[in-house]
Image: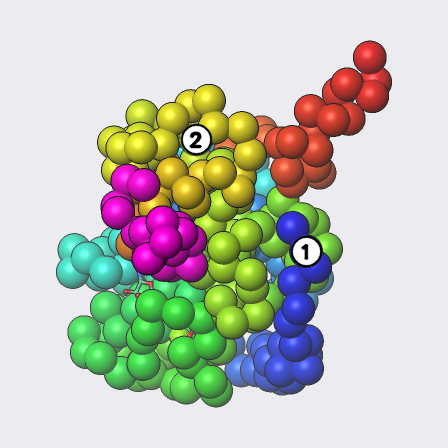
Amino acid sequence: MHTINWYPGHMAKARRMLEDNIRLVDMVIEIVDARAPMACRNPDFESLFKNKLRVIVLNKSDLSSKAQNRAWIEYFKKQSITALELVSTSPSMRKNAVAMIERTGKAAMEKAAAKGIHKTLRAMIVGIPNAGKSTFINRIAGAARAQVGDRPGVTKSKQWVKVSDYLELLDTPGLLWGKLDNELLAKHLAYIGSIKDDVLDIEEIASLLLYDLMRICPDQLIARYKKLTRDIETPAEMLDGVCRSRGFILSGGVYDTERAARIVLDEYRAGKIAAIALENPDDDFNAPADETKKENTDTENE
Ligand SMILES: Nc1nc2c(ncn2[C@@H]2O[C@H](COP(=O)(O)OP(=O)(O)OP(=O)(O)O)[C@@H](O)[C@H]2O)c(=O)[nH]1
Ligand SMILES: [Mg+2]
């Protein structure tokens, strides 16, 4: 994948905002996309949030599989981090989310109560763009208090949302970390819609996504785009297959690959292709991002 052309300026500003607000909160709730938990995480959080209560929410768990969600929760548990799977778009998540926040903040609340203080628990919601932070907050608050959108960069500045007399949540803009140097993880961030499409070559991203999905869930992929086959050898040919499946053919028989790319990304992000994660805890995240490159290296080694 070509180097992603992004603008670190506003990310640096957002990071400063995060550092400035950390002292105002008791708890940090980190929202990750269940399809790509590794790509979503920030190694700096360990030091940044070291004295805070912490929880990881594996959000959009409806877009992954039960077994993969469980494996990730186990993975975090081994690092002594509480994680839970949620679907922030579903009304039934509220009960579990509130119980999780109360359980995590219980000792701090009791300590304050012992001193006769009626404490308000303050939690900061952090995560990469488009992970579902604002959706999570709105569901807990029981109202559309924070703006939500199916693209990255919707929340522009921090916003406190009062849930009750004892709970306030801080919505923050999505932050992208240094993951863009790791090609594999950067690719995942592009697939799940956390990097603005206008800085990406969407035809390249959609081709790579199709190529990867052909390895992860070939049956579901072929069920959706019937002209795709397992023997397609290069990412570039994948989009032609989608054009043939959907009749995206321009005058002169030219494939409308741009239209195909948009459709593929939209359908993938909306969970229409398969409920399956891109990442599993025991994957090698330092492997070459592109299978074709890996095969080349394998041959070189022989
Ligand atoms: N399928 C599914 N979609 C979700 C879930 N949670 C959020 N979404 C969708 O994800 C998209 C992004 O949600 P937001 O809440 O705006 O994300 P955000 O993290 O606040 O994004 P920024 O403000 O851009 O950083 C929206 O289209 C939501 O409807 C979920 O659990 N499952
Ligand atoms: Mg938001």
Q: Residue at x 56, y 46 (%)?
A: 38
- Assign the magenta stretch its main secondary structure: helix
Number of other residues with Cα within 10 Å of mark 2, as a class: few under 14, some 14 to 19, many 20 or more: many
- The boundaries of the magenta stretch are 244-266
Q: Is residue 44 magenta?
A: no
Q: Which residue corresponds to mark 1?
A: 2
Percent across and percent down for residue 257 are: 42, 53
Q: Residue at x 68, y 76 (%)?
A: 8
Q: Amino acid at mark 2?
A: Met
Point out which mark residue 214 bears.
2
Residue at the extreme top: 302
Q: Is residue 70 visible?
A: no
Q: Secondary structure beneath disc 2?
A: helix
Q: Quadrant of residue 96?
A: bottom left
Figure quadrant of the C terminus: top right
Q: Front-most of 2 and 107? A: 2
**Is residue 259 covered in magenta?**
yes
